[in-house]
Amino acid sequence: MKASLQLKMGQQLTMTPQLQQAIRLLQLSTLDLQQEIQNALDSNPLLDVDEEFEGDAPADQSTQSEAAESSTAEEVSSAQEAVTDDPVADNDWSENIPDDLPTDSDWDDTWQASASTGSTDSMSNSSSGPSEDFDFDSRNGTTDDLQDHLLWQLNLTPMSDNDRLIAINVIEGIDDDGYLKVELDDILNSLDPELELELDEVEAVLHRIQYFEPSGVGARDLQECLSIQLRQLPQDTPWLPLAQKLIDNHIDLLGSKDYASLMRKLKVKEEELKTVIRGIQELNPRPGSQIDPQASEYVIPDVIVRQVKEDWRVELNPEIAPKLRINEQYASMVKRADSSADNNFIKDHLQEARWFLKSIQSRNETLLKVATKIVEFQLDFFEQGDEAMKPLVLHDIAEAVGMHESTISRVTTQKYMHTPRGIFELKYFFSSHVSTTSGGECSSTAIRAMIKKLIAVESAKKPLSDSKIATMLEEEGIKVARRTVAKYREAMQIPPSNERKRLV
């Protein structure tokens, strides 16, 4: 081919690094944003955390602070005098500590031994307040899973070496719900053939594990799990014999809620069957769920909505990220005409710091603007509840704030709003619509709330079917098909009518 020059006209979007950074920060969640800020502080010496309070303190606050400082000074001086006048605090404790300590000694051992001779008042005062480093979750939480919990009990159980080896293999086959998912034959085949073990020995070890905590662990199916828990109940439980007979022989009828057949086969009346079923419902079909190694996760809201008199105010949560500023000491070192490596280093990082601060500010302004418009659109929800939720799509907010829908999608993803009705993701306020008989529109969120309300007040013996719920909604002026009701019900994890039927 012959080389030639051609002139073409076209349009394309060129994203500057500053724009890319602004878009990336916009879609970050609160935790990711905090990590990004920390990375920027670690890598850029021109960025610094602004720990100073903005503005001057009011006169009354300054007066209170001066009074607090004077009272604190008086308390410190009086405490020092008390310590000086107290011979126990000044002499006894120091005399009990030897001059030369062994190299492997622990200071806590020596201090606790000597502190026991001190006054009771000083000890009570020192332990009266909680420690600032006290971490409730780390001290009271657990990171052990179910298998670790079972192995801990196994170590406290006297067993032979062969039985202990079998028990370890059995525990390894128990899942997080507490059920044994491995066949006993497979466990036997996985052991050393030279041990000459029998299947009866594996079965016997399994029965011993089934008496471990939590109750019902090691079962191979639901029937065995409930039966194990029933056997561990006190023998004088009034409804225990009937419950064992029901679980052992008629658990399928209980699952299908065929109460008439249960009363006929067990030869009991309705009140007796209610008592038995009530007792079975107190059992745990997933015993392993009691041992949860997962730590608690907390949602940090990005926006706070509160009502002041008759107005709703939207504010950014000041706790989501630290306040940043330019380090003026380093910024003052920049010289215009200097092209040295040090000066260029400071200039480049100064520009990056300014871009980063501007991107953070742009993110906060966009988030506040979008959240404010959402509150304006869904004002009825904040005042009345879910049933007053209006249909809302991203396009509506995009037009209201003058932004693209993709920007609104980034802002509302993994961002949370704290309201008097709870904490919601911003995506929660967007929903599709269903037509009404009057020609208007109703939000799908409002329809879900209506369905949940109807099911909450239904008769336990004769629950509402999806068709009946659709008919009742149509009477309220909302045209919705039966399959739509079923879809909304399943989305809320509500079982169908035949599974909601109860005798008690």
Image: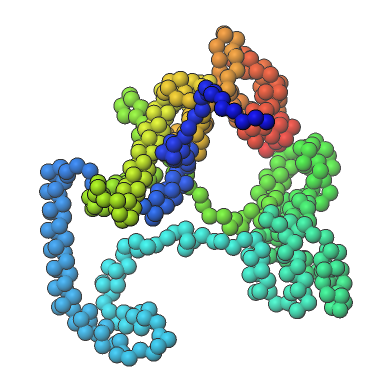
State the residue lying farthest toward the top.
438
Q: Most extreme residue toward the front, as rendered?
A: 2
| Image position of 267 with respect to 120: above or below | above
Which residue shows up at 26% across the image and 84% down it?
94
135 or 121, nearer to the observer: 135
Q: Is residue 244 visible?
A: no
Identified at 16% across, 52% down, the residue is 65
**Display coloring:** rainbow
Q: Residue at x 81, y 66 (%)?
A: 187
Q: Does residue 362 sit above or below 377 in this rendering?
A: below
State left or right for residue 30 relative to residue 199.
Answer: left
Question: Residue 36: x, y in percent?
Answer: 43, 48
Q: Position of residue 431 (x, y in %)?
A: 55, 25
> Is residue 111 something that shows in the picture?
yes
Looking at the rendering, in which quadrant would you find the N terminus? top right
Image quadrant holding the C terminus, namely top right
Q: Front-most of 435 and 233?
A: 435
Is 381 displayed left or right of 242 in the figure? left
Residue shown at 47% from the left, 58% from the top: 137
Residue 199 falls in which quadrant of the image? bottom right
**Front residue of 454 and 129:** 129
**Left or right: 208 with respect to 317?**
right
Where's residue 46, x and y in %?
A: 31, 51
- Residue 133: x and y in percent read 37, 63
The image quarter in which residue 383 lies: top left
Please state the total of marks drawn on the protein image.
0
Q: From what the image shows, is residue 494 above or below residue 115?
A: above
The answer to which image quadrant residue 68 occupies is bottom left
